[in-house]
Image (spheres, grey):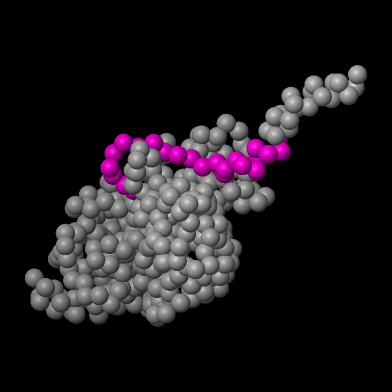
Amino acid sequence: MSNLLQQLLLPLLLPILSIFFILPSLMHAKSVIEPCRSSDSCTSLLSYILPFDSKISEIAYRFQVSITDILATNSITPAIPTLGNNVLRANSLVKIPISCPCVDGIRRSVSTEYIVRAADTAESIADGYGGLVSAEQIGIVNGINAKNPLFDSQSLVIPLPCTCFNNNNNGITRVYMSYVVQRGESLSSIGQEFGATVMDLEAINGLGQTVVDPGDILAIPISACSSANLNWYNESLIVPNGSYALTANNCIKCICGTDDLNLQCFPSGNTAPCSRLQCKGSSLFIGDAYVQRTVAGNCNVTTCVYRGHAGRKIFRSLASSSQCPDKHKANSPISGLSPVSSRDPIDPFITVSPSPSPAYINPSTIGTGTASGPTSYAQNSYISGDGGLLGEASCYNLLLPALVLQYFMW
């Protein structure tokens, strides 16, 4: 009787057992897919955990992006000429900026190309991208199969995940980063690392439960600064917090700190020739501010602000406010500039420092200055674009060269 039951039940049990033992090995990692209809694109981020030691130049080539863009996205000031040859260690986290267009009704990046080498397999190529793409995806997109195997020097399209969601989350500007879940991580630990709530991660990624598995790809909202309300001429800029962007033909550097999510723009200090960086009718350059402090403790602040560009023409204007600058921020210009992740891959190799504006003087070599004339103002001072304080006497020393320069520019 027992043998008869086994013969009857075994055919019924085999399909059920296959679900538990065979199906999991065939399942692909979960990832969010954003439907789209328009032809526009946005800037998205990839969270790339290096599978092996790599030079910055190699990473840039691997993803078909510029070294400059990688430096900006990871808040690295290019102070070292051979920076692209610096080697980053395996398991370092590097943020990769990519364009995220609408392709065949969904958001995905297809601008990365890979040239096959003799020893390559689809699996080894996928491994080089840190889990952001699978061997199966590479095969499907490029028509790789048993009848059409890889061959040396073949050009492959590498499909990479990306999302836009209108650069918005609950009415707040966001840039979305594709992140590969690592072993031992949870939604809670990932949210804590990148400043997102578990509820947000569940909603954005369409998760019905809080469980994620290694290899899953999540869209993570990263807070960002926007130029939308800054009255810029013919230009729009969104910069993830803890990053910077170069604009106006690399003449202007705009950083996004974590304190108030306001763009702070000043001359980049690059060697490229840049003109029209000084506001008309003043000795202030873009990003510089002049603060007049009253006896009552109030402030009259005049700032030279960036207003966009057209070709090589840079727009700027003077703006006034009565809000006294935070002394701590003035003396620590990058105090709000920090990586969105607690993992900083660049620390062993790079010292991050702000780029000085043309009117910059080291604040450690001068005093803050006190007005010696009428007592209507208790203290006057200049704040350079990168946050350094300039004493009143030093500002007078800068005035004569600035007037001469102004004479030739206008």
The quadrant of the rendering that contains the N terminus is top right
Q: Is residue 213 above or below residue 113?
A: above
Which of the two residues, 365 or 21, is positioned nearer the viewer here? 21
Which of the two residues, 266 or 98, is positioned nearer the viewer here? 98
Which of the two residues, 343 or 386, is positioned nearer the viewer here? 343
Q: Is residue 30 visible?
A: yes
Residue 162: % across, % down: 42, 47
The quadrant of the rendering that contains the C terminus is bottom left
Q: Is residue 341 visible?
A: no
User: Which residue is painted at 71% across and 38% down in the image?
Assistant: 21
Tell me the quarter of the picture where residue 343 sits: bottom right
Which of the two residues, 187 or 257, is positioned nearer the viewer here? 187
Residue 158: % across, % down: 43, 55
Is 40 contained in the magenta span?
yes
User: Which residue is painted at 35% across and 38% down in the image?
Assistant: 105
On the rendered structure, is 252 left or right of 202?
left
Q: Is residue 271 above or below residue 375?
A: below
Residue 329: % across, % down: 43, 61
Tell me the quarter of the picture where residue 92 sits: bottom right
Q: Is residue 123 above or below residue 10?
A: below
Q: Provide the residue span drawn in magenta.
A: 20-43
User: Which residue is painted at 73% across and 30% down in the image?
Assistant: 14
Main SS, magenta region, reads loop
User: Which residue is painted at 41% across and 44% down in the image?
Assistant: 163
Outermost residue, right direction? 1
Residue 277: % across, % down: 21, 68
Tell me the quarter of the picture where residue 302 sits: bottom left
